[in-house]
Amino acid sequence: MLSLHEIVAIMTRPGSVIFPENRPSMDALIDQNGKFVASPHAMGTVWRPPSGSPKSGPRVLITQAGHAIFYGTHGHRILCVDPGGTPLHECAWADTGPDPKLVYARLYLDWGQWVGLKPEGLVNIGTLDLSRKPGWQRLTTKDLQMMAAQALQVTPEEIAFFYGDQSMTTAAQGRVTIRHRKDALYILDDGGSAKPRFMACMGAMHWGHIDFLPVVELFQSLLPGTGSATFELIRGLYDDQTVGGPPRPLRYRGIPTYPSPQAFQLFSTYFVPEAPGGADPFPLFMEPRRSGEVIWKPRPDLPRRYLDFAQGVCVTVMGGAVQKVTKLNDSVPIPYTRPRKGGWAPGGRMLGTTPTALQLQDGERLEEIPLRPQWGVTRTDPLPARPPASVPTWRALFPEGIPALDTKCAYGAVPLYPDDETMVDEVATLPLVVEQTLEYLDRVAATTKGPAAFKTALLHGWDAVLAECLDLAQDRNYTVLYTRPEFAQRQAQRVWDQAAAAGTLANLRRIVFLDAARHHEAAYGKSYGLIYGWIPFEQYRRRTDCERQLGAVSKALAPEGAVIMVGPAWLSEACRRVSLRVRVADPVAQTPGVRMHQAILPKARVNPDATLFLLEKI
């Protein structure tokens, strides 16, 4: 347990508290530290000034797990640190009395990156003209909510929950302004808020009174560990608000809802799901219209994080059992986790626990790290016998060795989307077109006259969506030319996960990942039945370069093969000159993926000239 001396050291340590709103509270605690008295608490022990209260005002709670939570003069949580004094999250509040407002927060991820949370940081504004509707002058907010409920096919109560009086306003001319507020998540490259980069968003939470569970939109953009760190904060504030009283049941709410197995698993880590009548809650949760019927109650055995910089790990323990270990300064962005029922773990990185050590196994590599008493590990679960050498790892996809990456580059391999009118970049455009791409492929497979032509495939420049494009169920050999090594590595790991879950790891021998800069000429010297091509945006005005790439694709395409390519719209004019026929050409801006994305970020813009082509040999 942290001593008073260590508590004071945390309060005065540079970087522990960076929000200016929190400085007065920390100064008040420092001024009183020599006079602190201890009081028992349901979650541990509270240190407070002699005249203070163990339930309100400035104080420090040392939990039974050894973590310290600092509360400000307003009584709300401002800092949480692990037993070693490493900050896990910091919160800044507007001191508004009984209705506290979270101004912003920052969350520390297992691998050392800070992310920011800005309540209502994203506000989408839309308008509706009701001037031709008879009696529009008499429409109230409740009437507007009823209309919105009918349009979105949800209950009026659900609309009212997210759209209050300030969200819907009517002007004198009958024009209704609708403001949809969302909480925004940002990457904080400097650990603070100097230059935040938008990452994702979620339903606007009532942080002063946690009353529902949100799902993050743009979840593919989340840096690894963001979901867990966010729910660590949500559960922490929930406990602050319900301590000493009955648990407050929660439901998942959203307009629309985005239920997924990943969301269910994350919720279940911090809360216990219950379905009406004792039924299985998972199928009910997965029905978008009925997800909210599942009730979530607090788990008694919370996951707790411990940073150990001396051994270079972040250890997550729940109920006395180690759940996850993340190695610091690791170029492989996958934590070690306990084997699943099939005997595998994501990325092949398996975790075991003996009475004295952690076992970290990555393929044939086994490392042991001594247990620390402060982690509170009471349950052992040693690893089974090591797998035979014949079982391939994801590294086998890179015959020349995996790319050389640093930690932040490896972990940062996610597509990021701007929250303004800035054009979406190339790597983030790929996930927006992959759904239409797969529809193209289904269309080709259904009509092709030569199925044997698809025995070989070349993918060039599709690094961010390879796991969606590589179909291990097909009898097909894949050559991947990658230009973004950090994305190629992450996708190779996802491909391995899919193969391990399906029991088809042997099929990985059909796939090879090669650096495009070194292997372009040799790869295009072979023949393929299916080619995925991507012309960089910067080349769109350089017609000679584009036509040269198109010619190389045509030369490498088998007689009855097909090409799926993204390039400038004018490319259709050049196809016939290289013996290619345009079967379909869809502007990227009009694809379903872009329309779905704009439902979340209405200001989103993609390259207006980018076109998705389905081509075939003449």
Image (cartoon, rainbow, N blue to C red):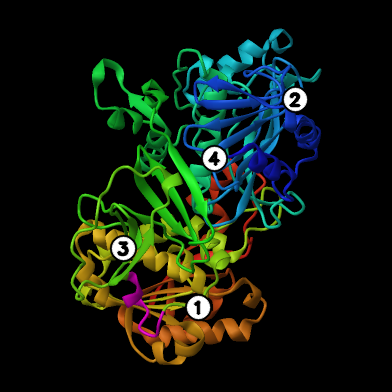
- Which secondary structure lies at badge 4? helix
Three-letter amino acid code at the position of disc 1: Ala
Q: Which residue is mark 4?
A: 230
Number of labels in the image equals 4
Q: Which residue is mark 1?
A: 404
Q: Residue at x 54, y 20 (%)?
A: 40
Q: Report, in whole angstroms, how far the alpha carbon at label 2 lies from the one at label 3.
A: 47 Å
Q: Report, in whole angstroms, how far the alpha carbon at label 4 lies from the one at label 1.
A: 30 Å
Q: Which residue is mark 3?
A: 348
Other residues around mark 3 within 10 Å, as few (<14) / some (14–19) / many (≥20) = many
Q: Position of residue 522 (x, y in %)?
A: 41, 92
Q: Is residue 457 visible?
A: no
- Which secondary structure lies at badge 1? loop
Q: Which residue is mark 2?
A: 73
Q: Residue at x 49, y 53 (%)?
A: 224
Is 431 left, or right, of 98 in this rendering? Answer: left
**Residue interval drawn in magenta:** 394-401
Disc nearest the viewer among 2 and 4: 2
